[in-house]
Structures are given as C-alpha cells and as structure tokens.
Image: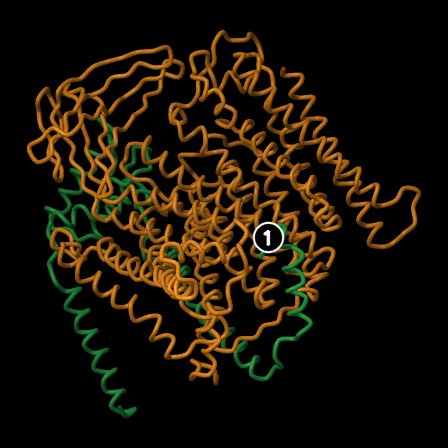
Chain colours: A green, B orange
Amino acid sequence: MTASRRFILWTRALQASALAGAVFFSMGASTGNARYTNLNHRLLCTCGCNELLGECNHTSCPMSGPELTELSAGIDAGQNDDEILTSFAIKYGATVLAAPTTKGFDLVAWIAPFAVFLAAILGTILLVRRWSVGSLEAPPTAPASEALREQIRRETDGEGGY
Amino acid sequence: MAALGSLSLLIALALAVYNLLAGAVALRLLATGAKTAISPERLADTARRAGIAGFIAVCSAVFALVWSVFANDFSIAYITEHSNRALPGAYKFSAMWSGQEGSLLLWAWLLATYGFVLRLTHKTDVRLYAYAGTILAAVQVFFLAILNFAAPPFALMRGAVPDDGNGLNPLLQYPEMVIHPPMLYLGYVGFCVPFCFALGALMMRYPGEKWIRITRVWTMVTWMFLTCGIFLGMHWAYAVLGWGGYWGWDPVENASFMPWLTGTAFLHSVMMQEKKGMMKSWNVWLIFTTFLLTMLGTLLTRAGLVSSVHAFAQSSIGTWFVTFMIITLAVCIFTYVLNHSHLKSEHRLESLVCRESSFLFNNLVLLVACFVILWGTLFPILSEYVVGNKVTVGAPWYNTVAIPIGLFLLFLTGVGPMLPWRATSIRSIRRNFVVPVLVLWLTVIVCLAVGVSPWKDGAFSAGNFYALVAFALSAAVMAAILGEFFGGARVISHQTGRNLLSATYLLTRRNTRRYGGYLIHIGVVVIVVGLAGAAFNRNQEQEMALHDKLAIGPYTLECVGFTQDANANYDSEYAMLDVWKGGKRVFQMTPEKRVYLASGQPQTMVAIHSVPEWDLYVVYEGTNPATNQPIIKAFLNPLVSWIWAGVAIIVFGTVIALVPSLSPATASLRVPARAAPVEPVLGGGL
C-alpha cells in the first residue's frame, strides 16, 4: 500500500469517526425530568448537610423540599438553567451552587486544571524528545553506573529488593 | 493513670529531643572527622537507643489512655468527651482516636513504632539508618511537643468529675471505625520513613538507588495501608452516612487521596531510577511532597481552613502544623540546593514510545490529578481571599475535571506494561495492542446492546458516557494484563512442559514484583468498573405502612413490621422488609434508626444486600411527623461490591510484590524487548 493511499484511508477513518461521534452525541433530546435531575445535582441543600439538593436524605429537611419546589417552579416558568441557578445564588448565597460558575474569578477554577494538564503533557513530550535526542548523541550507558546498580541490587537482595 | 500518661509523654519528648540532638551532633562529627572525647559512633548509638526507649514511653502513654477508657476514668477530659460507661468494648478502644488529642497520640505511637523497627534494623546500613533515625526523631519531637503542650490527652476535668461521659460520636460506632483510622494513619505516618531515608540519603550524598531499594518494602507496605485506609473509609461512609454513596469529595477524603496519588507516582518512578538511573531528583521530591501532603491533610482538617463533615477536632494546632511544614520544606529545599549535584541522572531514551516514557506520563497524570484535587480543596479559600466570595467546589466540579484525568490514567495503566523498555517497534505495537483494541470496541458494542448508553432520560449524560468509556477501557486494560500473564506463562509452559496454570504460578514467583504489580493493576481495573456503576444508581423513597410495597429494579420490598429495641447504649426502631424477586421471597432486610442515649444523637444503620450485579441498599429514614408513617428509601447501586473486591485484589497483589522472587526472570522472557531495536523504532530518529 502506498503512502498516499494509506493517508487517504486514515483521513477517511478519521472523518467516519468524527461523523459517528457527532451522531452519537446529538441523539436524544433533553426531557423536563432529565433537566430537573441535572439542576438539582448542581445545587446544594442549604440545611447544612452538605449534600447535593437532589440527594439530601434527611427526613423532614426544612430546606430541600421548598428548594426542590422552587426549582420545579423555575423550570415550569420557562427560565433557562443560568437564570434558575442565578436566582438560587442570589437568594441563598454563592455557596448554594455545587460548583463554581464559569464567570469572573470562578472561571479560574475550571481553567487551571486543564491548563496544568496540557502544560504538563506538553512539558513531558518535550522532555521525552530532549532525552531521546540526547540519547542519540550520548555514549551508551556508562558501564560503571550499571555495575554500581547491579552491585546495589545484590547487596540489598536480603531486604526485599530484587 | 493520667499522671502515668502525662509523665510518659514528657519522658518520650525528652528522649526524642536527645535522639535528635545527639544524633545530629554524632553525624556532624562523623562527617567532619573531628576528634572528640566520646566517639561519634557511640554517641549515635546512644541516640538510637534513646529512640527505642522513646517507643516504650509512648507505648506506656497509649496504655494509660486505653486503660483509662476501659476504667471509665472520667476525671480525664478526653475520656469524658469521647466515651461513656455503656460504650461497647471495641468502641472504647476506638475512642482513643475519635478526638484530636487521641488521634495525635495514635499518630505519635505509630511513628514511634515505625521508628522502633527502623532503629532495630540499623545494621543494614548503620550510617544511613542513623541519618534516617535522627530525622525521624525530629518529626517525633514535633508530635510529642504538641501532645505535651498544645493538645494533651491526659488533661484533667475542671470542677466535679461526672458520673458518665458524653459517649462516642454515633457516626464512629461502626466496626470499620475500629480499623479505618489506624489503617489510614499507618499509611500517613508510614510515608515518614521513606521521607527520612530520602532526606538522609541526600544529606550524606548517598548512592541514589540504595535508599530506594531499602525503603521499597516500607513504601509498599505504607501504600497498602493507605489504600486500605481510604477504602475502609469509603465503606464506612457508604454503610453509615445513609446517602447511598461512598465518596463525596470531602476535604478530608481529598486529604487522604493526595498522598496516595503522589505515593503511587513514587512507586512507579523509582523503577526508572532502579533500572535506568533516571529521575533521581524527581523521586526525592516525590517523597518529600508525599510527606508534606500527609501534613497538609492534617492541617486542613485541624485548622478549620476548609469545612468538612470530618473536621470533628478543629483547634489552634493548625499553627503548629503550618510552622512544621514551613520548616520541613525549608530543610528539604536547603538540603536539595546544597547536594543536588549528587543526584545527576542518566537521562537517556532510545525512543519516544517506550516503557520509560509511559512511566513519565503516568507520573505526570498522577501529579496532575493530585494538583486538581488540591486545587479543588483550596479554591474556596483562594476565592474568598481574592474576591471575598466563598464558593463551593463540590462533586459536579470534581466529576467534570477529575474523571477524564482518571480515565486517561486508566488508559496508561493498560498501555504502559505493553511497551517494552528502551524502544518500541511498530510490529510490537501491532502484536501487543490488537487484542486489547478489539476487546475495547467489542465492549462498547456489547454495552450499547445491553442498554449501557450515554443517554439518560433521553438526554446525553456525561456520567453515562464516562461509564461507557470506563467499561470499555477497563476491558481493554484487563485484556492487556491477562495477555501479559498468558504470554509469559505460555513461554514457561513451552520450556518446562507445565500446564498453563502452573506456568502462571511459576511466572509470578519468578518475578513477583512485576506480576504483583500487574495484579494491583487488575485490582484498579475492577475498582474502576465498580465506580463506573454509580452512573446507573437508582433510588425510590416511599412512606410505607404495614404490607405496603416498594418496587426497585428486580426487587419488591414489602413492609411486614416495625419494631423497637433498646439496650444500655441506644434505643432503636427498625423496619422489617421482606424482599421479593421473581415472585419468590428471597430474604428480609432490617434497616434501623438508633438514638444514642449518652449523646442523644440519632444514627441511621443501613441494611445492605450485596451481590456482584448490585447492592440493594435500604435506609429507614424515620417517621414523617405529618402522617406518622415510616419512610423507607431504597437504592439499587450497580457493581458496588466490585470496588471492595478490587481492593482485596490490590492487597493480594501488593503482598505478592513484596514476596522475594524465586529467581531472576529468565532471559527467554525478555526476547521480544531485545528483538525490538532491530525493527523500525517509533520516534527514534527524533
């Protein structure tokens, strides 16, 4: 198989995967029940139990019942997710939201982990490349170091090292 | 007994101070070669013996506290606050670590025990052990100083001595709580030992590989204890808190998970140093970080920096921990700057795609996961400091950020062991990866066919999608690992004529470290499958009168009675629920609600019926005051038992990895790795 033929095959495979992915993710439509469950898992119960609103399991909890009713009312009134979450944050304080928002300083909470992850991946790739390049220029492993390591292995065999 | 306990702690502190000072002076004299009246070797030995005597003193303090609990000595404030006469014996024992002072005493005791073993085995390498023992003594001084001056466990009650105590926190009156804290602390405290060896080796410019090989057993045992401690805590949360889950991303849970991640990274990267002489500085800093994270975990819960359901013992000792951490970090940095030239590594890779680079990526992902958890734990403080607005960083944030990283780690778990050391060829990739990739796609198809799809109630669900990916990756990783076992066993079977089972046993015995590690990976995969099951949890809540029925999954629960009971420790009421499946009554469950008499606090006792497919988890929530009807909440939690089975496999794998190999792996088993360089090497020309 020629290189150009192989390239075309790979391109086709990628295109098919992308199409399959798009179909996969676009199937199904959100129902009211799913949205209600999703939202009550993005809010905390304010009774002090530290549970998600949809998972508060305290009998006669003074807060979760009224808050769930309020959430249903918001959905029925045609409010979008942001409007509902904002109204809860205004009424009960920002800590009612189970996760930081994606606005202002809160955005840093979301960006930092992925930024660090990407930076670390990039850094590791560069490091591996550098060490690979270095290995081609450098002489093979120094016999002295290998011998030292082997000697240490032998000496510490009795302590569980092998 | 209070006097004996206090005196023992004071003596232990004095001995630790002597151990530290005499040890430091002796090591300095040995390093400089200065002539003195007493030989440095003898001085170092007196320091070591002081450390051993210190262990006996701390044991004496622990004995005094345990004796006082069992003797109901309520003249001691700690006993009054954490025990009562009716408390069952096992829980009286666990009262020792139910409060701040007791848990710090447990920490000091375990540290002294580790120190005792370390000082007894000093002949392995007298000088290195002297360094490690002296550094350990410094840590002991810190904990014993706190116990003597900031959080004394033997402080006496002011005023009249009460007839009875306040009792143990009901949440802690559960069998796991008798073993979970000691396990977790064995893990936390245990990382102090490799830390001391690493710092000591750096101070004396010791050959890098040797301290790693000496501390390997310490590190693995410690890691195993920490793993058990974390999962016992998860099981406790699952069985006691009554919310149907086992991990809530609480700061205290996070605090135990962070050193586990860095410890795991260390266990992997030391192999790079042992086999290739690489990553020497990295390993030293990994173990420094792990130790500091164990301290940070304590700081987070003790200083009240972050709110946590576990932060039962907040006080001002956070300042002590901050000071200690700053001093420790300063010592680590100073020693490293002074001696880092000694850690010059032999960084050479023959290919971009090889076992070495997979170890690098594995370390990277573990550390990024650690950063993510630390970031999420501390972000509320940061937000309050920067914009004056405290926010919640809860499960939705962690699930969004941490799960993809976890899945990537799972992917590396499968890929890493399939890559040979030094270099990988396209042919070997094809040979090693075809089956796992096929298994992956087959699993996706099977999952979709049986209804495990990324949609829930008609909408795309990230949880379901992640679960599908987790199942598929788990199957692929399992195929890869089993392929490693099968491939090796087949070679041995061919060489020796043994059957495959016997050959697998021999293969494992020949290289226990490698195949023990694979078993640990299998355990991790099994745990991931169990965790992924959470995406399909279901629950039903219902008020249930006599003979009312509640259906969940294949089960129907029928209420056949409610009753009450009482003993000296608590009053209880519980429901009796017959469970029907397929028209047959299969068993009865009795979820319970208790009210503990000493504290007046209620506590739920969940009823759990566990089978490999799922857990039927039933909570008696109490009575609805408006209707006076009992409320039952039932959960059907798929695959939860896989999590606990996975932990058992991890422990088994760790024990296997600790057993010395029968003989070095045969050369014939390395044939594929040796053959690789003659084939076109991936990225080798870069």
Where in the figure is residue A59, as x and y percent of width and height? 23, 27
Where in the figure is residue B173, as x and y percent of width and height? 39, 24
**Residue underneath mark 1:** B288
Q: Quadrant of the N terminus of chain B?
A: top right
Residue B565 lies in quadrant? top left
Chain letter for the residue marked with disc 1 in the picture: B
Where in the figure is residue B106, as x and y percent of width and height? 56, 31
Residue A12 visible here: yes
B523 with respect to B580 (left or right): right
Front residue (pair A91, B605): B605
> Residue B559, relative to residue B228: is it above or below?
above
Residue A107 visible here: no
> Residue A98, relative to residue B661: is it above or below?
above
Front residue (pair B165, B355): B355
Give me the residue at 20% from left, 26% from top.
B589
Where in the figure is residue B440, as x and y percent of width and height? 26, 64
User: At numbered mark 1, what does the secondary structure look like: helix, strand or loop?
Assistant: helix
Give me the residue at 39% from left, 17% from top.
B599
Identify which amino acid the numbered label 1 is placed on.
Phe
> Residue B247, relative to residue B204: is it above or below?
above
Give me the residue at 10% from left, 19% from top.
B546
Front residue (pair A48, B485): B485
B569 with respect to A63 (left or right): right
A133 with respect to B461 (left or right): right
Mark 1: few/some/many CA within 10 Å (<14, 14-19, 20+):
many
> Residue B646, relative to residue B616: is it above or below?
below
Residue B477 lies in quadrant? bottom left
Which residue ends up furthest to the left in the rendered image?
B583
